[in-house]
Image: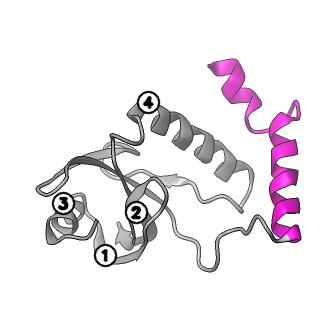
């Protein structure tokens, strides 16, 4: 999805210097942008594909992971929340979610070092002192 209406809607949330970088599996578009002087990746998601409650859980997990390790880019608060609903003339309502921006390539599931690093993080999640334990006990 690329449209002037989408860029205008994202700008209304405070995103600046919007530059489209990729289309994801569940994302209608992903932009490199700035918000409050911070560089972010903005994902635009279709609510027909991603339920808001599931998105909230995903962002909560990402926040906890980002607190535990620097290999995870956490979500960034924009306006009053992590999930912003915006109306786009050509698409209806969509979700906009910002994450910390990371330069470079995404982890590669075919790269042994990347897989090992992801595996270590998964082990940490299951450890009694891991970052997700607090989430389980609080939920």
Residue 56 falls within the magenta-colored stretch: no
- Determine which of the numbered discs, if any, sits on residue 7 in the image: none
Q: Considering only order in the chain, which callout, 3 or 2, is on the residue closer to the N terminus?
A: 3
Mark 2 vs mark 4, CA separation in Å: 19 Å
Mark 4 vs mark 3, CA separation in Å: 22 Å
Q: Considering only order in the chain, which callout, 1 or 3, is on the residue closer to the N terminus?
A: 3
The residue depicted at 70 percent of the width and 23 percent of the height is 136
The residue depicted at 42 percent of the width and 41 percent of the height is 50
Q: Which residue is mark 1?
A: 18
The relative height of residue 117 versus residue 65 in the rendered view (above or below) is below
The relative height of residue 138 versus residue 105 in the rendered view (above or below) is above
12 displayed left or right of 68: left
- Determine which of the numbered discs, if any, sits on residue 42 in the image: 2
- Based on the displayed image, in which of its 4 quarters is residue 31 positioned? bottom left
User: Secondary structure under badge 2?
Assistant: strand
Q: Which residue is mark 3?
A: 9
Are the two marked residues, 2 and 1, in contact with CB atoms closer than 8 angstroms?
Answer: yes
Q: Considering only order in the chain, which callout, 3 or 4, is on the residue closer to the N terminus?
A: 3
Q: Considering only order in the chain, which callout, 4 or 1, is on the residue closer to the N terminus?
A: 1
Mark 3 vs mark 1, CA separation in Å: 11 Å
- Based on the displayed image, in which of its 4 quarters is residue 4 positioned? bottom left
């Amino acid at each position: 999805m690329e449209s002037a209406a989408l860029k205008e809607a994202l700008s209304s949330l405070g995103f600046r210097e919007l530059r489209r970088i990729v289309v994801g599996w569940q994302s209608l578009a992903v932009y490199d942008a700035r918000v409050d002087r911070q560089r972010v990746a903005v994902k635009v998601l279709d609510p027909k594909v991603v339920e808001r409650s599931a998105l909230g859980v995903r962002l909560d997990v990402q926040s906890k992971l980002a607190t535990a390790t620097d290999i995870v880019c956490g979500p960034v608060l924009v306006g009053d929340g992590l999930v912003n609903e915006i109306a786009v003339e050509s698409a209806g309502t969509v979700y906009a979610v910002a994450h910390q921006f990371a330069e470079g390539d995404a982890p590669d599931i075919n790269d042994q070092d990347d897989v090992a690093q992801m595996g270590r993080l998964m082990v940490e999640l299951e450890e009694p002192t891991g970052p997700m334990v607090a989430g389980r006990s609080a939920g």
